[in-house]
Image (tube, rainbow, N blue to C red):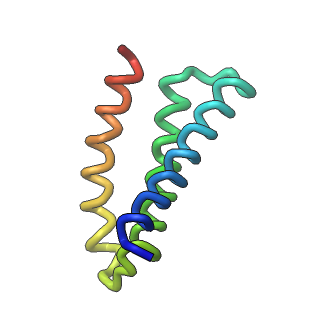
Amino acid sequence: MAIAIRYLIGGAAATMAHISILMLLVELFNIDPSISTSIGFCIAVVVNYNFQYHWTFVSTDPHSRIFPRYVIVTFVMLGVNLTIFLM
């Protein structure tokens, strides 16, 4: 399977996790949407990281080296997500 398709599948799974958590927290638990989307985003980070590390790129680099870089880039994107969400 092409690496691009694996990447897209991992991203789609993470997006589904994000949106599902967001909807669940807002609709069932009446948690503020900004907090809910942040929690959903954090869960999506873990889902996406695992897909990309283990399946898309089949990395053998240690998590201690790869994960911090991934988290930095991803949390910059959290800021973008929240900015768009709060507009």
The picture places residue 43, in percent across and down from the top left corner, at 52, 49
User: Which of the 4 image quarters holds residue 4?
Assistant: bottom left
Q: Is residue 4 left or right of residue 13?
A: left
Q: Residue at x 57, y 46 (%)?
A: 16
Q: Image quadrant for the N terminus?
A: bottom left
Outermost residue, top direction?
87
Q: Please indicate whether residue 46 sits to the left or right of residue 82 in the image.
A: right
Quarter in which the C terminus is drawn: top left
31 is higher (above) or lower (below) than 11? above
Q: Quadrant of residue 61?
A: bottom left
| Residue projecting furthest to the bottom | 60
Q: Which percent across, then down, holds residue 47? A: 51, 58
Closer-to-camera residue (30/51): 51
Residue at left offset 47%, top offset 46%: 42
- Left or right: 33 in relation to 24: left
Image coordinates of residue 11 in percent, x first then y, are 45, 54
Q: Tell me if residue 34 comes above or below residue 47 in the rendering.
A: above
Q: At 47% across and 60% down in the image, what residue appears?
A: 10
Looking at the image, the residue that sits furthest to the right is 28
- In the displayed structure, 4 sits above or below 43; it is below
State the residue at coordinates (55%, 31%): 36
